Image (tube, rainbow, N blue to C red):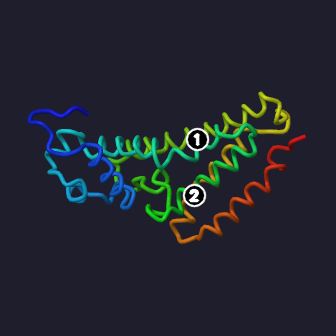
Amino acid sequence: MASRGRPLTFDPDTALQRALEVFWERGYESTSLSDLTRAMGIASASIYSYFGSKESLFRQVMDRYGATAGAQPRNALDEHSAVREAIQAMLRATVDQITRSDAPHYCMLILAAPTGAIENEPIREFLADIRRSQFTAIRDRLQRGIDEGELDASGVDTDAVARYYATIVQGLSIQARDGATRAELEDVLTGAMAGWPALTRTP
């Protein structure tokens, strides 16, 4: 969002990163404007002038998250020519992300969502749309495997398999938040991939 009035006295990129860290740690509903002003090092008037409302700021934060920390699992789907390896790499990238030592141990997309206030319904739906796009990305990767002859179309329900692995991704985040170790999450990943033959009935 373009600034108005006097020249900026802060670095917008740094301020946005600090807002991301606060929202990631506290979630949307639990983050107050005073939390944001302290973390971003700017006055509330500057937040409104440059970033807009709290909702607008959060949407910009999620765009940043999706292009940085949240990008690795989705990118993994395109970095492997074999579909099974692509799905496995996506899960491993998820585990990598949610066990980082320098960030909260969960996916911001899963656990920063608002849960109660009616006025936050637009943000709930905004985050749900992003999660649905994650499901779509997995389904599209499975369909690509069918189109390329790697999977048998008669043996794969792409919606069901995509929903299964999207659920694994979301469940890993909740487990990490609740204290599961890297080794324990790797066991979940191994189990999820052990079901691949039954899910795809690969010839």
Label 1, on which residue?
A: 75
Q: Which mark is residue 28?
A: none
Residue 122 location in percent, x, y? 38, 42
Which quadrant is the C terminus positioned in?
top right
Q: Residue at x 65, y 39 (%)?
A: 79
Give whichever of 186, 113 is nearer the camera. 186
Q: How many marks?
A: 2
Q: Quadrant of residue 188?
A: bottom right
- Answer above or below: position of 78 versus 24: above
Q: Residue at x 45, y 45 (%)?
A: 68
Give whichever of 106, 82 is nearer the camera. 82
Image side of residue 1 versus residue 81, left or right:
left
Quote the CA–CA distance across marks 2 and 1.
13 Å
Question: For the residue labelled by badge 2, is the local secondary structure a helix, a strand or a loop?
Answer: helix
Q: Residue at x 41, y 40 (%)?
A: 63
Q: What residue type is disc 2 on?
A: Asp
Q: Residues within 10 Å of mark 2 (few under 14, many from 20)?
A: some
Residue 198 location in percent, x, y? 84, 50
Label 2, on which residue?
A: 96
Q: Residues within 10 Å of mark 1 (few under 14, many from 20)?
A: some
Question: For the residue labelled by badge 1, is the local secondary structure a helix, a strand or a loop?
Answer: helix
Image side of residue 184 versus residue 46, left or right:
right
Which quadrant is the N terminus positioned in?
top left
Q: Residue furthest right?
A: 203
Q: Are marks 2 and 1 in contact (CB under 8 Å)?
A: no
Q: What residue type is disc 1 on?
A: Asn
Point out the tag, 2 or 1, that comes first from the N-terminus.
1
